[in-house]
Amino acid sequence: MGPGKADLLDAIASEGSISAAGRKLKMSYRRCWMLVDVMNRCWAGPLVATSTEGALVTELGQQVLAQYRGLQKATASAAGQTHWPDLAQQVRGEPLPPRG
């Protein structure tokens, strides 16, 4: 679980489908589906359930998401005061163009 997968779970919960979540996050359906597939295979049970009517975040998915967001918040408050400002200074405003 990471911030991208957590954001995808949030988007699926709010949008009710993987494709709508992808549009909201400006991510391809294929990429979203691959991330959902990985999450569903890596946890004790599926985090996202799909049907012909769309997708929903399962009860386990909601629990995992809440626990992850809690961890994010605790980490941010613990590390944000000292490490994040220094790290943020090293990040480019825009990435370099691809080589080639």
Image: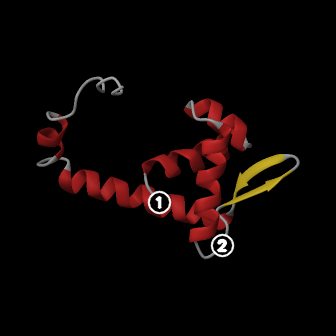
Q: Which mark is residue 91?
A: none
Whichever of callouts 2 and 1 sits on the residue coming sooner in the sequence is: 1
Image quarter in which the C terminus is found: top left
Query: Is residue 31 found left or right of 81 in the rendered image?
Result: right
- Residue for badge 1: 1
Q: Which x, y percent locates residue 71?
A: 37, 61
Q: Quadrant of residue 37?
A: bottom right
Is residue 56 depicted above or below 31 in this figure? Answer: below
Q: Which mark is residue 45?
A: 2
Is residue 4 depicted above or below 37 in this figure? Answer: above
Its colouring scheme is secondary structure
User: Counting other residues with Cα less than 10 Å from the Cα at mark 2, is it few (<14), some (14-19), or many (20 or more)?
Assistant: few
Query: Is residue 32 found left or right of 72 in the rendered image?
Result: right
Q: Specify the farthest residue to the right.
A: 52
Q: CA distance from mark 2 to mark 1?
A: 14 Å
Q: Specify the farthest residue to the bottom.
A: 44
Could you tell me which residue is drawn at 66 percent across and 49 percent down?
33
Q: Which x, y percent locates residue 98?
A: 36, 27
Is residue 29 depicted above or below 79 in this figure? Answer: above
Is residue 38 or residue 76 the one in the foreground?
Answer: 38
Is residue 94 or residue 99 the one in the foreground?
Answer: 99
* Amino acid carrying mark 2 in the image: Gly
